Image: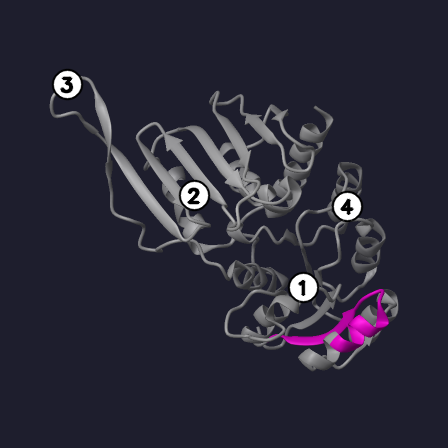
Amino acid sequence: MTDSRIVIVGCGRIAGGFNEQDEGRVLTHVAAYRKLGAAIVGCCDLDRKKAQAFAGRWSVPRYDTDIDALLKSTQPDVVSICTPPAGRVPVMERVFDAPSVRAVLIEKPVAARYEETQSIARLAQGWARPVLVNYGRAFDPFYRRVRSDWAKGAFGPWRQVVARYYGSARTNASHLIERILDMAGPPVCAQKLSGPDDAPVFEISFGTTGATAVFLPSPGCEYAPLELDLLFERGRIRIVDSERRMERFISRPDENFRDVFNLVPAESFPAGGPSHENVFYAVQEVLRVAKGEPVAADVFRRGVLVDWVLDQINAS
């Protein structure tokens, strides 16, 4: 990893701000690259003072407001796109035109509008090199273990999901949408059921199994609920308390009633619970694929699907 050259575009909180005062935990792109020993050779922001401050704080040798000039002068292998999602199409055009770039990591969501997401998807298809989206739970060892065990038939087909999120659907529910799409595949329908446009109650339906996922916002809470309740044919997994606790259950015959099954507690996964430093695993993955190793999961395709789901909800 140590010979990889990195440029970070957009110098806000997810780029480095969340680690501004403390690098004890990896919460940002810059902290992850530093921990993995990659060389951050440049940073870019439309606000020159912000780019300059970022470069000074993280000892980045070059900064600029002109992305073309920065890419030409630094010749990076990997680019992290940490800009706000609106207006990313021209940014991606410039990054994909840079000959040295071998892989790109985009902060979620892919774009602010589905039309822009589609444009970026077409650009990425023509570029034909790895493009990853930082839906960090896709790279988290815990969630990968859940996905792997489910794929091996440990729980049987999944039947229903109830998800709880805070803030806006685009910012936070999108993480949970991506996790469900990873197991369920493309949805056939997504619709708003009630509530405000930015934080609605909504439902996603999947035709292959007839399963549904219902998303509930949590307004008025001083804490940040982000939870999944996954019901499978033969078991249940609950990820609760802002992803700080996991409960696992398996079905067993009822001791009193024939042909009746009940859920009983089961051992937790060896991987423990979800990581709150999952940006580390996303950065680790983009560095790995930039070296020519195969992409472990098609997170970009799911990122495009997430934006489609959000577009459907907004239109309903």
Whole-percent x, y for residue 194 in the image: 62, 25
Instruction: Give residue 280's quadrant in the image.
Output: bottom right
Q: Which mark is residue 120?
A: 4
Q: Residues within 10 Å of mark 3 (few under 14, many from 20)?
A: few
Start and end of the magenta stretch? Answer: 38-53
Question: What is the spatial separation of the Cα atoms under label 3 and label 4, in whole angstroms?
Answer: 56 Å
User: Which is more toward the observer, 268 or 207?
Assistant: 268
The answer for how far apart the CA atoms under marks 2 and 1 are is 30 Å
User: In the rendering, at what x and y percent does residue 18 appear?
Assistant: 61, 66
Disc on the earlier residue, 2 or 4: 4
Q: Is residue 185 left or right of residue 39?
A: left
Residue 59 to residue 299: above or below: below
* Nearest-to-viewer mark from 3 and 4: 3
- Residue matched to label 1: 13
Asked if the stretch drawn in magenta spans residue 180, the answer is no
Where is residue 270, by image quadrant?
Answer: bottom left
Residue drawn at the location 82% of the way across and 56% of the way down: 91
**Mark-to-mark CA distance, 3 and 1:** 56 Å
Relative side of 188 to 112, left or right: left
Q: Secondary structure at mark 3?
A: loop
Residue at image point 62% right, 32% down: 200
Amino acid on which the number 3 mark rests in the picture: Phe
Label 2 or label 1, whichever comes before in sequence order: 1
Q: Which amino acid does the dot numbered 2 rest on?
A: Arg
Report the mark closest to the observer, 1 or 4: 1
Disc 2: which residue: 147
- Three-letter residue code for mark 1: Arg
Residue hosting label 3 = 257
Earlier sequence position, callout 1 versus callout 4: 1
Q: Label 1: how many residues lie within 10 Å, few (<14), some (14-19) or many (20+)? A: some
Residue 125 in view (yes/no): yes
Callout 1: helix, strand or loop? loop
